[in-house]
Amino acid sequence: MIPSAENPVTPMLAKAVPTVPEPDSVEGGLVYEPKWDGFRGLIYVEEQENGPSRVEIGSRGSKMLTRYFPELVAEIASQVSGSCVLDGEIVVRRGEPGAERLDWEALSARIHPAASRIAALSSETPASFIAFDLLACSDLDLTGVPFAERRAALVDLSASFRAPLHLSRTTDDVEVARRWLDEFEGAGLDGVVAKPLSSIYEPGKRRMLKIKHHRTADVVVLGYRVHTSGSGVGSLLVGLYDADGALQNVGGISAFTDKRRAELVDELAPDVMRDDDGKAVTGETERSRFLSGKDVSFVRLAPTRVVEVRYDQMEGRRFRHTVQFDRWRPDRDARSCTYDQLEIPAAYDFGDVVA
């Protein structure tokens, strides 16, 4: 069955690998693309006999995002001729020409319940769409043909694209891909994707390969959230000292086993801050717009314990994704855990990435 808004497709995914693979490491060869840091978007375009094409935007989880991006809907209806299904990434670019980068926070803010706010943000922080695959064209289902053929068809379809619609660039040169991994982070991208040229499109399967940055940092444990089961440590909240000596919340560590969650309660007990009555002191983190009903309370810990974590990139003053526990650092003084230790990527203009 041809993918459509009534028959939405689950996007094909990527599995993480530590380094950019050689092009001949996979049968049929590999091609490389930038890894765009935005919302996965499945664009369903249905040509109408009278009037503009019908456009629907599906998310990675098949939730429709159409209402949140009216400016993209209008551009797609104007620029894309015929019926088709595009796979790609929705991003928001900010900054002056020559110093643009992707802005995850501005993109996240686009998911808002109020129609008036959606209309305002569509003008204040307009989105762009980066197309990197073509799943259907006219009455043809392309999911069963090799990526090399789908890419060729996408190149033809996108020949007339203009901003805010873009065709993702590719290269078959592994050294260029490795340079992209280093350079494009400065424009807000978060890695490189390697795609097998001979692979068909397999919804929900991790057939592509993604390469992201791997870094470590020493951070201070600020507190912990109780696991959703009601028992054990669900996640650790961690922080860094800024230039003014203030301890800032920068993210969290999770993914502990049941056994480890229980052990952490005992390990952290001496650090729990208590009031005059001996009760544990609690606090609350900022509530996410996506998880408005989530319990954001946490048990406060004295800021003395240091942990080394693995992370990929920063988003402003916080870790972009949940970080991974590496090891305790009893040799480190908590006050020495500052932002200065973090690697800051060299700035790179997003306009050059999509040029």
Image (cartoon, grey):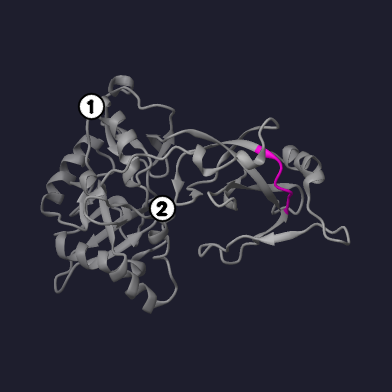
> Is residue 34 left or right of 251 when viewed as pictured?
left
> Is residue 112 left or right of 300 when viewed as pictured?
left
Q: Mark 2 points at which residue?
A: 60
Q: Quadrant of residue 257?
A: top right
Q: Name the residue under label 1.
A: 173
What residue type is disc 2 on? Arg
On whether residue 58 falls in the magenta region, the answer is no
Q: Which residue range is magenta in the image?
A: 300-306
Q: What element carries label 1?
A: loop
Q: Disc 1 or disc 2, which is closer to the eye?
A: 1
Where does residue 22 sit, x and y in percent of width and height?
Answer: 31, 22
Q: What element carries label 2?
A: loop
> Is residue 170 left or right of 206 when viewed as pictured?
left
Q: Quadrant of residue 345?
A: top left
Where does residue 181 sit, x and y in percent of width and height?
Answer: 33, 34
Viewer-side residue, 314 vs 68: 314
> Please, what is the dominant secondary structure of the magenta stretch?
loop
Query: How dense is the environment of label 2, judged by Cα within 10 Å: few (below 14), some, or many (20 and up)?
Result: some
> Is residue 19 left or right of 168 when viewed as pictured?
right
What residue type is disc 1 on? Asp
Viewer-side residue, 255 vs 308: 308
Where does residue 3 sit, x and y in percent of width and height?
Answer: 30, 54
Where does residue 249 sit, x and y in percent of width and height?
Answer: 59, 52
On whether residue 303 falls in the magenta region, the answer is yes
Estimate the spatial distance between the alpha carbons at disc 1 and disc 2, rounded to whole Å. 29 Å
Q: Is residue 67 above or below residue 37?
A: below
